[in-house]
Image: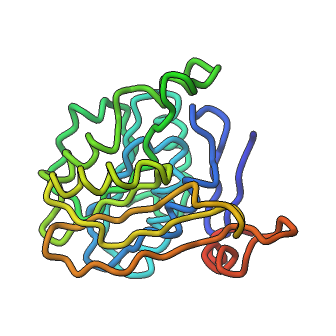
Amino acid sequence: MGVFRFKGFEVRNEDSAMKVNTDGVLLGAVTDVFPEDRRVLDVGTGTGVVALMVSQRLSALTPEFSVQGLDVDRPSALEAAFNFAGSPWREHLSAHCCDFHGWDGGEYDLIVSNPPFFDNSLKAPDCRRCAARHTGLSYREILQFSETHLSPGGRVSMILPSQVEADLLRYGRMCGLVPWKLLRIRTVETKDPSRLIVQFARKGALCHAPGELTLTDGKGRRTSQHASLLTDYLL
């Protein structure tokens, strides 16, 4: 798939098991960042696109930040490292090939992830893509990790299928986390939401009312809300 060009950076999109996709770009655009977010972790970084989008916004807020991308797939981690090295924020970014379950990088102010969600009946035909989707990484494990590795004011942000919402929120509460912000995403106005982006914070945080985003209108064009969300990123 060559190179995917954004306004502020380029992403080589050839070797990663999981390519640049709508879910990842939405996660990178929707996730809130603050000047206090000095340490960020991107779990299952793939090409590194979410880490790069977060870095673009953080660079406008603070000169001191570090974004780490993890991926168990070596070609993906190497491609993320290549994309990080070619970006304006190369000194703030690092990619690591490792099993998330064995990672202990201390506390993070923000954890982001576009985690696997294919079940056994939906395995992808490509073996590396299948492995990327079935490495044991799940929203439960990300929430468990976040319970012990988030800073006191930290958040964890994920994009998932809408049908897991009830279980996701229930498990978050079990881990001492509440849905600080929740965005339900539908492809068109006439369809039910198919994705949700949830940003969790520790219990006690003031939670916002759930929001909605419709991606396209009846003619297949991006809605104004969708276009506005991506205006700083897409050419």
Residue at image position (34%, 51%) is 68
Left or right? Give the position of 141 relative to 50.
left
Residue 27 at x, y = what percent? 50, 60
Nearest the camera: 51 or 182?
Answer: 182
Image location (x, y in percent) of residue 137:
35, 34
Taking 101 as reference, is 85 above or below it? below
Image location of residue 46, percent across then percent down: 51, 41
Q: Residue furthest right?
A: 219
Horizontal arrangement in the rendering, residue 203 relative to residue 46 (left or right) = left
Q: Which quadrant of the view contains residue 47?
A: top right
Q: Residue at x 36, y 38 (%)?
A: 96
Kindly identify the residue that appears in the image at 39 percent across and 62 percent down.
Answer: 198
Q: Is residue 55 above or below residue 223?
A: above
The colour style of the image is rainbow
Depth check: give the residue in front, 166 or 157: 166
Q: Quadrant of the C terminus?
A: bottom right
* Horizontal arrangement in the rendering, residue 71 relative to residue 99 (left or right): right
Task: Pick the quarter of the image with the N terminus.
Answer: top right
Q: Residue at x 15, y 64 (%)?
A: 151
> Residue 93: x percent and y percent?
40, 55
Q: Say above or below: 223 vs 106.
A: below
How many callouts does the rendering have? 0
Left or right of 200? Residue 194 is right
Q: Is residue 114 above or below residue 136?
A: below
